Amino acid sequence: MSTVSTDETFVHPALFYRTEAEYARQTVAFLREGLAGDEPLAVAVPGPNLELIRDGLGAEAEGVLFLDMTDVGRNPGRIIPRVLRGFADAHPTGRVRIIGEPIWAGRSAVEYPACAQHEALINAAFDGRAVTILCPYDEARLDPQVIADARMTHPTLISDGREENSDVYDWEAVVARYNERLEPLA
């Protein structure tokens, strides 16, 4: 995995995985690249995956900010300002590296549109910032539409250890699709 960028560009890859071992191997490798570059690191993923990463890093986990996304990201509208921008803005110089998994098996159908918009809007929120945000997606457990949307909201796709540019990248279309009218309260 080579998600390193030394300029002021935003890097936003989706990581597609099928097993816990693959998840741990790829996310830990991503973080070790950041450690090698002396980048500030944050991990915001659901609790069980948080432990996989922490265990995979071992002693290297010291100094990494670990956040349970089921808590800090329960409301998808708060992830960009409070979690991602909160961490990135606290480190205004140099590149920042974050793993963010806002969509996991178990998110409700009501929550999903806001999550999809969150993934799309990251591209606008971090444009021109020296930030890399890796977003893992469980291909074995997530709905095919979630995977299709991830391919549209991430300019770079990583699967089976191979990195490629998305040929369907169009984050603005995802924002528009999920910009749904709220039904009146009864």
Image (tube, grey):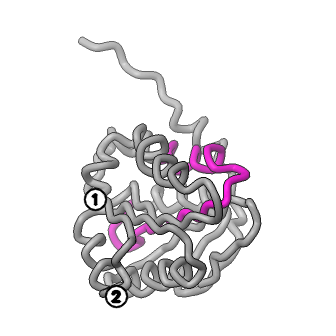
- On screen, residue 27 above or below 12: below
Q: Which of marks 2 and 1 is nearer the N terminus?
A: 2
In magenta, the rendered stretch is 116-143
Q: Which residue is drawn at 39% across and 65% down?
A: 43
Q: Position of residue 130 (x, y in %)?
A: 67, 60
> Which is nearer the eye, 13 or 62?
62
Which kind of residue does numbered mark 2 sit on?
Answer: Ala
Left/right of residue 109 with respect to residue 87 in the rendered view: left
Q: Quadrant of the C terminus?
A: top left
Task: Kindly give the residue lying farthest to the right in the view shown.
Answer: 7
Q: Position of residue 79 (x, y in %)?
A: 42, 46
Q: Residues within 10 Å of mark 2 (few under 14, many from 20)?
A: few
Instruction: Tell me the distance, in whole angstroms, between the alpha carbons under discs 2 and 1.
Output: 19 Å
Classify mark 1: helix, strand or loop.
strand
Q: Position of residue 46 (x, y in %)?
A: 29, 62
Classify mark 2: helix, strand or loop.
helix
Q: Which residue is drawn at 73% across and 60% down?
A: 9
Which kind of residue does numbered mark 1 sit on?
Answer: Asp
Q: Where is residue 152 in the image (x, y as percent from the top left)?
A: 62, 56
Q: Name the residue under label 2.
A: 21
- On screen, residue 119 above or below 154: above
Mark whose residue sits in front, 2 or 1: 1
Q: Name the residue under label 1.
A: 68
Residue 184: quadrant of the picture: top left
